[in-house]
Image: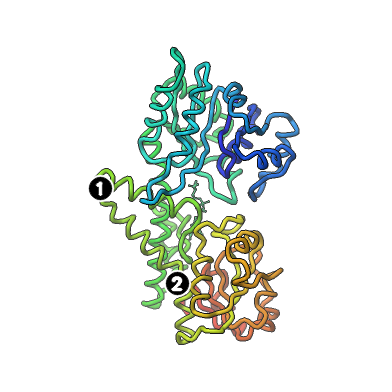
Amino acid sequence: MKIAVIGTGYVGLVTGTCLSETGNSVICVDIDPDKVQKMKSGIIPIYEPGLDVLFHRNIKQDRLHFTTDLAEAVKHAEIIFLALPTPPGGDGAADLSYILSASLEIAKLVKEYKVIVNKSTVPVGTADKVSAVFKENLAPGITVDVVSNPEFLREGVAVEDFMKPDRVVIGTRSETAKRLMTELYAPYVRQGNPIIYMDERSSELTKYAANSFLATKITFMNEIANLCELVGADVDAVRRGIGSDDRIGRRFLFPGVGYGGSCFPKDVQALVKSASDAAYDFKILKSVISVNEKQKVVLVNKVKKYFNGNIKDKSFAIWGLAFKPETDDIREAPSLYIINELLELGAKVSVYDPEAMGNVKALLGDRIDYSIDPYEALNGADALLIVTEWSAFRNPDFEKMKALLKANVIFDGRNLFDIEKMTDLGFYYNSIGRKL
Ligand code: UGA
């Protein structure tokens, strides 16, 4: 099939590349000429494991193209995906200006029936707004269908999530659009995972409900972990104890330093705002937001307690800056909150992350030190704080760590190590929701 993807951010680029992998002819459009030029010459602007293989293969096989020319893409495509940013506006609601202005431009270019697919995370009612823009601006006699097709992919495993999705949600009441979308997604659900059809509004809400539910699940576990510490229980045991119940499930029960990233914080905020616009007070989600804010600095509170509030001029090593492993993304990353708190308290900070150092350097400059490997960061540090659970941190050389650290003190925000082992090795090891 012939596809256009408008916007080559994270979602757009993964969508375009993965759609070309099953034989579709895909044109990706971006307004940034430098970015387009780079992609044309085979440079991927984001870090996403596994994307490079598909990206290069499909460019080589002439199925994946990049352009700044919207008219060329609109002419080419039967199905046009909108994968544009929806940043939070001042009031927490998603800003739809990119989507609505792109819709207006596309409407003026359309000369025959097209399916317009909204891939961005957008509030309930956006498909109707986009439809209205098309209706007002299409040439007489021409129609389009606007479909809501939220994406559920996770950074770091986005290619796998796209190629083998748990489910595909298609929100449309048009039989023609339904048929075309089913044909497009058929290769991705061959193992029997469902395509779930619904109306546009339900589909839009499904995306927010999914992310908000997961954020709530994590936050619930973070509170259980905090309680475990107070009552002498072990959150790992409780997690396993409840997760084996199918109704609860094992995934997304790992306590830590709070959720971050470009999706959960933004989407939970936006759902609270949509609810309040509909005169509904979404109390659980408001609590999720405030609990998560506190959880982001839980490690700093542990540090303060350990050093009796005396942190000034102490030096701390931080392992992990990205909001989660396998990404260089630091948006809403707990590491940034932790670093800021430590700096405000007068501490020195030395950091290491396998992928996100460049992004943090661009933000914090020389306010902190950057290490070339995890061990360099430990040199002379009063304590190590582990913030992101990169695999490379799971089995370190503990003797080397002891030799480098000023004191054998670790605050682990991701529960990477066995407590008994750490005690035997002579560490003071303070993790989340577990015994000291
Ligand atoms: C999330 C959703 O998982 C995707 O399904 C969705 O498509 C995406 O948002 C989006 O809306 O685009 P993502 O933000 O990439 O994906 O990352 P997750 O793997 O979901 O992690 C989110 C945050 O939760 C991270 O900060 C992670 O450390 C934290 N987390 C996750 C925990 O603290 N505990 C867990 O058990 C799981």
Rounded to the nearest whole Å, what is the CA distance between mark 1 and mark 2? 31 Å
- Quarter-of-image position of residue 410: bottom right
Residue 199 visible (yes or no):
no
**Which of the marked residues, 1 or 2, is nearer the chain's N terminus?**
1
Circle 2: residue type: Val
Q: Residues within 10 Å of mark 1 (few under 14, many from 20)?
A: few
Q: Residue furthest top?
A: 141
Q: Where does residue 4 sit, x and y in percent of width and height?
A: 58, 29
Residue at screen point 46% across, 63% down: 258
Residue 330 badge: none
Residue 95, above or below 215: above
Q: Which of 236 and 330 is in front in this view?
A: 330
Vertical order, 64 against 160 (above or below): above
Please report the residue visible at 60 percent of the width from the left and 62 percent of the height from the top.
360
200 vs 8, left or right, is left
Q: Residue 280: which numbered mark, if any?
A: 1
Q: Is 432 placed above or below 134 here?
A: below
Q: Quick one: SS at disc 2?
A: helix
